[in-house]
Image (spheres, coloured by chain):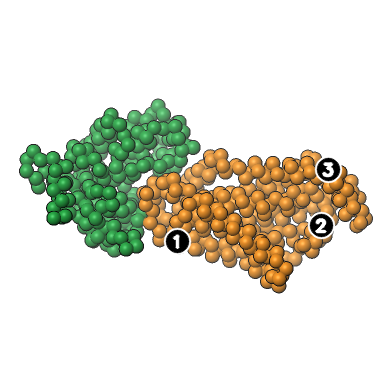
Chain colours: A orange, B green
Amino acid sequence: MKLFLRQFYSELLKLFARKRTYMGFGAFLAVESLILLLLQTPKAKRMFTQSMTQHGLDFSHYFSGLTLAYVMMTNTVFVLGSLYLALVCGDMVSKEVEDGTMRMVLSRPISRARILLLKYLTCVVYTWLLTAFIVVSSVLLGILDRGLGGLIIVAPWEHLFAFYESGPGLERFAISTGLLCFMMLTISNLGFMFSCFNMKPASATVLTLSLFIADTVVRNVPYFENIQSYFLSHNMAMWMQAFQPTIPWMRVLHSVLYLGAFDLLFLAIGAFYFARRDFKS
Amino acid sequence: MIRLENLRKSFGKRVAVEDLSLVIPDGALYGLLGHNGAGKSTTIGMMLGQVIPDGGRVLMNGHDVQGERAAALSQVGAIFETPSFYGYLTGRQNLEIFCNYSCPVSREEIKEIVELVHLSSRIDDPVRVYSHGMRQRLALAQALLPRPRVLILDEPSEGLDPEGIYEMRELIRQLHRDFQLTVLICSHLLAEVEQICPQVAIMRMGKLLFQGDWRNAVHPNRTLEQFYLETVKGIEV
């Protein structure tokens, strides 16, 4: 166990000592700040005021840090999140193969299964850190700008309308973070699977993004509404249900299991290929 | 002892290694020779479990590399033609990372080996600023940690200047002499192999043409280069 932890530490060191690992964190902070800035414009404030007064809500209370955090999150998490998860997890194995360090690792008395497990766990850590960072940075930036206040959620496409005081609002953010951490793993798993194939790191990233974007685009075609529940992006968007006044846990559980099955499938395919491939210069 | 038994490997229709059987005794200084595409790198890949053979097996100190990978490779160190490291990490961090895949080694052991390969003054620099020769010496250091019984060197002198080639040659001799290592050197530089290895195996198009003490197989005053060319040419006739 001690050796395993040392090996895991080595994998984390390899990942987090690289500057490009932090690109995602920096990009999120920059885009969130930009959104925050744009939300201060009179036009944005007018739209918020209209929406809130229609429902008899006090603008000054609900145009708060939590509401802004929610707006920042929903606008960044899938677009930027998928990009950076695909970039890092798509690199995880293929970059080492391309650089030649995988051959050096494989000349050591360590099984391929263990190498893959270590790399996969590193992907999981990165995914969770990035996802948690997105939520925490959104909330912190929002609070720094507008203070805590109430939280209002308006998302007609998810049949979602709710408002909370700051305490329950923060609770909902905590639940959504947990769900999001799990759901974003699907993109990481997809990237990791392609990374195990005999392809360049850039190809693994592009393929992951292409599949995810194709899934999202097709899902949004009105003709496919009745098969929505089969799309990965539909199930991944289930994290937003954490903001429903009554959380539909059965629906959430269904999505968790559905995505979990795909996660296992992607991992199994990647592992199968990795165990059988030849590593040559 | 390294024992290769009826080893076979094809990539698509191309046969890379064909029915290769070879025994490298304990404590030997052994050369593996052949032209480009002869199957040397594939053979080394199979010895280290990086390439999966279509048939046959490799035994390292009595353990099957495919079936008992951990036991087979626990006392094997290897370097490759173009040593690859994590350039953004220091030499020391690289050594620690590679050692963690075997078993952890103490700072003293690392210090000792780093001194042996003359890298002490630069070990805490990022590897990206290392010259090719320094990378080659770092590769040798990682192969020697933790202490192996078998050392596999794929083109250890590739890209080195004459001084670097001389240093590498002396280092290999010293390692063999001081630690009684079994050393397998895969190289194009016949003059280098001639000076180091009394025993060689010659491959051509995946087949083994010769194995054993080459000096016994040629007339006195003949060089390894002449013997190699005759052996390889002989099959062409």
Q: Do circles 1 and 2 both sit on a common chain? A: yes
Q: Is residue A192 left or right of residue A280?
A: right
Q: In the image, what residue type sits under mark 3?
A: Thr
Where is residue B44 shown, x and y percent of the image?
30, 51
Q: Earlier in the sequence, mark 1 or mark 3?
A: 3
Res A273 label? 1
Chain holding disc 1: A
Res B13 label? none
Q: Do circles 1 and 3 both sit on a common chain? A: yes
* Contact (Cβ within 8 Å) of mark 3 with mark 2: no
Q: Do circles 3 and 2 both sit on a common chain? A: yes
Q: Residue at x 27, y 33 (%)?
A: B165
Where is residue A53 shown, x and y percent of the image?
92, 53
Residue A175 sits in which quadrant? bottom right
For discs 3 and 2, the disc positioned in front in the rendered view: 3
Q: Residue furthest bottom?
A: A226
Determine which residue is flagged by label 3: A41
Which of B222/A168 is in front? B222
Res A154 label? 2
Q: Residue at x 71, y 55 (%)?
A: A176
What element does badge 1 sit on? helix
